[in-house]
Image (cartoon, rainbow, N blue to C red):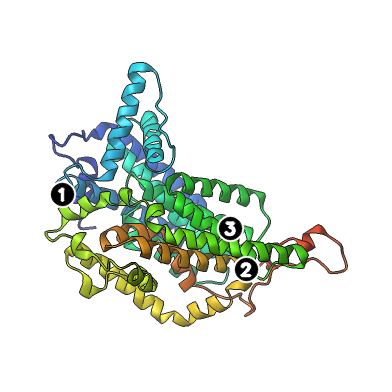
């Protein structure tokens, strides 16, 4: 509250006159009003009378706006226009300028990865105008609803779980609030991964065609932004399908016999080619960012091992680094505080982690979470060599890992078993793997 005058002003007037990007407050304020009104309505709708959830979401959205303002402050005096969101914005401006002059709309090839973000930015710019602050808020709003989707995925997968604690983690954890609050890949991929988790959680509760379509669309979104993450999610989904205790009959055994080796080969290939798939050329754009922020060389001074074998061996601790004694700058120190708190939280819930791992084959969604986490840790441990890059990338892991740490068994003390049709009735579905569990309706909202 004490800093609100500063960040509200910086939200509207972030740049100096000679920066190269106009502030355009008259163009930005209508977008802010529209987004804020829309968000308030959506929050009221999605909270469904849950006052605590509504209050948490409203406060979280205000924090998201403050994060946008902080990005504005950093990219001006510290980055000198070298941040990647500035690159997306200026390239989108060029596309709009060409369209205004020639009437030809530029389609970049390939359409994935950085080119996709540039094209999305240009589409939004065509609709809302070339106001940098406005586009930043739109991207931040997208990531905000990614936070909601992760929260809802947890509530659906674990009806008797610690919903309030999950809510506070998903909406208030600093990394989740800050890093996706900018024009760039982080906002879109975060929302799409949340969509995949949400839809798969619904699919494990009911064979909903809408959930399947939603999951497919989210997976396509991830593939357009970060194809290697889409590959990891596909392997995780297939692994949950093949390895959970829901494959019966001849076809089920055949699927396991053929599918499990393919999963192992695909996972080994992703890990072996980690540096190629993780696209370090893109994430290394944050090196200049970190170098300008701290007096020390945050990137060069934060290396955590050049040996590939060493990095793989340290993969289980990737989520908790840098440790406090490894921090060599203010920024690394802030990241280490959050990481250390997460490590304490996970350690205190180590028995929950053990139980969820042991019982993961009984719950397809939990098995999906575990496979994704293991893949992420191995692949990114094999490719990341410094904490600066890791801080931004691990937002794709933190919500998933938190859902495992907050795992809860069924309310009646039994673990969810997957549905099997009556043995005295011949059905094709009795020989095909199914993800539909028997779930008693306990009045939990499954929206």
Which of discs 1 and 2 lies nearer the camera? The answer is 2
Measured as percent of width and height from the top left, residue 84 is found at 28, 44
SS class, disc 3 = helix
Identity of the residue drawn at 58% across and 68% down: 159
Residue 83 figure quarter: top left
- The CA distance from mark 3 to mark 2 is 16 Å
Left or right: residue 239 compared with residue 113: right
Measured as percent of width and height from the top left, residue 392 is found at 32, 57
- The CA distance from mark 1 to mark 2 is 49 Å
Measured as percent of width and height from the top left, residue 122 is found at 37, 32
Which residue lies under the disc numbered 2?
Answer: 243
Q: Earlier in the sequence, mark 1 or mark 2?
A: 1
User: Relative to the observer, which residue lies in front, 200 or 300?
Assistant: 300
Which residue lies under the disc numbered 1?
Answer: 78
Q: Quadrant of the C terminus?
A: bottom right
> Is 378 drawn above or below residue 75 in the view shown?
below
SS class, disc 2 = helix
Q: Earlier in the sequence, mark 3 or mark 2?
A: 3
The reply to whether dot 3 and dot 1 touch (C-beta < 8 Å) is no
SS class, disc 1 = loop
Which class describes the residues within 10 Å of circle 1: few (<14), some (14-19), or many (20+)?
some
> Is 61 drawn above or below residue 183 in the view shown?
below
Q: Is residue 443 visible?
A: no
- The CA distance from mark 3 to mark 1 is 41 Å
* Label drawn at residue 200: 3
Q: Quadrant of the N terminus?
A: bottom left
User: Relative to the observer, which residue lies in front, 297 or 139?
Assistant: 297
Left or right: residue 59 compared with residue 239: left
Measured as percent of width and height from the top left, residue 174 is found at 32, 61
Residue 310 figure quarter: bottom left
Identity of the residue drawn at 65% across and 72% down: 416
């Amino acid at each position: 509250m004490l800093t609100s005058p500063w960040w509200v002003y910086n939200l509207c007037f972030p740049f100096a006159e000679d920066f190269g990007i106009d502030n355009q407050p008259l163009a930005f304020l209508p977008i802010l009003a529209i987004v804020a009104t829309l968000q308030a309505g959506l929050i009221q709708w999605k909270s469904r009378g849950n006052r605590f959830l509504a209050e948490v979401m409203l406060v979280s959205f205000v924090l998201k706006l403050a994060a946008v303002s902080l990005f504005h402050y950093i990219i001006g005096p510290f980055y000198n226009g070298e941040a990647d969101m500035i690159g997306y914005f200026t390239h989108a401006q060029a596309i709009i300028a060409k369209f205004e002059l020639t009437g030809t709309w530029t389609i970049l090839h390939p359409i994935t990865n950085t080119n996709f973000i540039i094209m999305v930015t240009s589409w939004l710019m065509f609709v809302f105008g070339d106001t940098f602050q406005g586009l930043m808020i739109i991207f931040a709003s997208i990531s905000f609803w990614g936070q909601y989707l992760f929260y809802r995925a947890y509530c659906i997968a674990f009806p008797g779980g610690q919903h309030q604690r999950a809510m506070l983690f998903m909406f208030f954890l600093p990394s989740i609030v800050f890093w996706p609050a900018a024009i760039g890949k982080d906002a879109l991929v975060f929302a799409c991964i949340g969509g995949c988790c949400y839809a798969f959680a619904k699919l494990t509760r009911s064979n909903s065609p809408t959930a399947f379509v939603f999951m497919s669309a989210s997976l396509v979104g991830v593939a357009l932004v970060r194809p290697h993450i889409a590959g990891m999610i596909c392997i995780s989904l297939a692994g949950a399908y093949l390895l959970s205790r829901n494959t019966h009959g001849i076809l089920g055994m055949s699927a396991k016999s053929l599918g499990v080796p393919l999963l192992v080969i695909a996972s080994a290939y992703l890990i072996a080619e980690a540096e190629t798939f993780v696209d370090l050329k893109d994430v290394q754009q944050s090196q200049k960012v970190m170098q300008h922020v701290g007096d020390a060389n945050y990137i060069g001074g934060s290396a955590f091992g050049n040996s590939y074998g060493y990095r793989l061996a340290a993969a289980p601790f990737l989520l908790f680094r840098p440790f406090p004694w490894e921090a060599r700058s203010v920024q690394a120190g802030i990241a280490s505080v959050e990481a250390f708190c997460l490590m304490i939280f996970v350690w205190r819930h180590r028995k929950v982690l053990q139980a969820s791992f042991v019982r993961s084959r009984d719950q397809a969604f939990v098995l999906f979470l575990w496979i994704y986490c293991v893949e992420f840790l191995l692949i990114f441990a094999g490719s990341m060599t410094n904490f600066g890059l890791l801080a931004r990338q691990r937002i794709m892991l933190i919500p998933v890992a938190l859902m495992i740490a907050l795992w809860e068994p069924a309310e009646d003390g039994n673990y969810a078993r997957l549905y099997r049709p009556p043995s005295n009735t011949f059905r094709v579905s009795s020989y095909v793997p199914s993800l539909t569990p028997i779930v008693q309706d306990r009045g939990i909202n499954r929206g």
